[in-house]
């Protein structure tokens, strides 16, 4: 937490994924980008390919992914641990090494849905699925590999609900469930880094993408996010290319060497913040090492990997 201070990266709010990769040659590098065919995952994949990387895109809908990206696609449903295991086994069998891993896939503020043994779907998909995936792929991670966990300013909505992770005691609240999952994404990076794998979590910014498909359209119009045609009209929103920048920067920037475990936003290190209506910075509970270790142990018990 003491390292959560801006470093003056030279990039910022309006930088794009291609901007942060200018002058960086990724020839010979292999990247995995979950959700790399939609939302901010698509421009992330495209920028990495342009910089010379080979990109593997695990996708819940591989047929759509193959239409969107000209790279290797495989099937993966993060809400299904059997699917996670099958993808990991196929990749490990190829004998390849992973240099960059960007966990960009996710769902947001969904109606109450149960997956697996009754898990709340946002926590299960956004956190537990990626937790299991990274742990199953750890034998393939190169010694200097980076793992990027895509969190969100949504983490400000909720700490981990230690006594009611899956909303079995209290009524389901989509916003709180999403917030908890994004806090989990940040804590995952903290402890993975403590275990020796360089990891970061990021807030990509506010972007209109398919991630908002479960939000009420009229509500987004009324609060000034979009116009009647669905176009973004809020100047504080980013384009998908700009939204992809921070996770791409986290995965590749030489400025971040040996700075793992940090939470990043706008292509820089985020500052610790108290509760604020501005949705900026990172709350202390999302980068707390003790909470990160506790969540890791709990996640390992739930998924059967990572112990």
Image (spheres, rainbow, N blue to C red):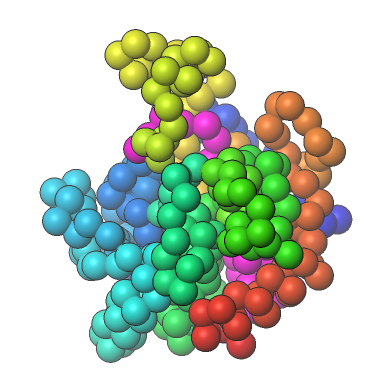
Q: Is residue 179 left or right of residue 8?
A: left
Measuring 56% from the left and 21% from the top, which residue is drawn there? 236
Q: Is residue 97 above or below residue 288?
A: below
Measuring 60% from the left and 37% from the top, which residue is drawn there? 266
Does the stretch in magenta take in 207?
A: yes
Measuring 30% from the left and 81% from the top, which residue is drawn there? 86
Of residue 157 and residue 239, the one placed in the foreground of this image is 157
Measuring 71% from the left and 27% from the top, which residue is drawn there? 278
Q: Is residue 262 left or right of residue 37?
A: right
Image quadrant containing the C terminus: bottom right
Of residue 72 and residue 298, the one placed in the foreground of this image is 298
Image quadrant containing the N terminus: bottom right
Of residue 270 and residue 52, the one placed in the foreground of this image is 270
Image label count: 0
Q: Position of residue 162 (x, y in %)?
A: 73, 64
Of residue 126 and residue 188, the one placed in the foreground of this image is 126
Looking at the image, can residue 157 be seen? yes
Provide the residue span drawn in magenta.
186-210
Q: Position of residue 148 (x, y in %)?
A: 53, 59
Q: Is residue 298 above or below residue 242?
A: below
Q: Position of residue 124 (x, y in %)?
A: 49, 64
Q: Position of residue 47 (x, y in %)?
A: 34, 46
Determine which quarter of the picture holds residue 193. Answer: bottom right
Looking at the image, can residue 23 be seen? no
Q: Is residue 200 above or below residue 144?
A: above
Q: Is residue 158 left or right of residue 148?
A: right
Determine which quarter of the picture holds residue 256. Answer: bottom right
Does the stretch in magenta take in 86?
A: no
Determine which quarter of the picture holds residue 125. Answer: bottom left
Q: Is residue 192 left or right of residue 93?
A: right
């Amino acid at each position: 937490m003491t390292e959560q201070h801006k470093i003056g990266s030279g990039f910022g709010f309006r930088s794009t994924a291609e901007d942060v990769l200018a002058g960086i040659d990724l020839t010979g590098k292999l990247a995995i980008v979950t959700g790399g065919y939609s939302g901010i995952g698509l421009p992330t994949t495209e920028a990495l390919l342009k910089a010379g990387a080979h990109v593997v895109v695990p996708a819940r809908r591989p047929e759509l992914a193959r239409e969107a990206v000209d790279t290797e696609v495989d099937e993966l449903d993060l809400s299904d641990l059997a699917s996670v295991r099958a993808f990991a086994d196929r990749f490990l069998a190829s004998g390849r090494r992973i240099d960059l891993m960007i966990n960009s896939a996710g769902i947001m503020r969904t109606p109450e849905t149960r997956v697996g043994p009754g898990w709340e779907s946002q926590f299960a998909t956004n956190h537990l699925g990626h937790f299991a995936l990274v742990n199953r792929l750890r034998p393939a991670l190169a010694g200097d590999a980076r793992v990027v966990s895509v969190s969100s300013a949504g983490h400000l909505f909720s700490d981990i609900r230690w006594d009611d992770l899956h909303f079995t005691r209290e009524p389901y609240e989509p916003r709180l469930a999403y917030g908890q999952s994004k806090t989990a994404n940040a804590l995952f990076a903290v402890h993975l880094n403590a275990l020796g794998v360089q990891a970061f979590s990021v807030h990509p910014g506010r972007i209109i993408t398919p991630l908002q498909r479960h939000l009420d359209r009229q509500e987004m119009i009324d609060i000034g996010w979009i116009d009647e045609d669905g176009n973004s009209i809020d100047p504080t929103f980013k384009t998908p290319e700009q939204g992809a920048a921070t996770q791409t920067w986290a995965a590749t920037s030489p400025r971040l060497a040996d700075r793992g475990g940090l939470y990043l936003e706008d292509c820089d290190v985020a500052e610790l913040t108290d509760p604020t209506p501005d949705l900026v910075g990172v709350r202390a509970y999302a980068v707390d090492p003790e909470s990160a270790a506790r969540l890791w142990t709990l996640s390992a018990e739930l998924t059967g990997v990572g112990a």
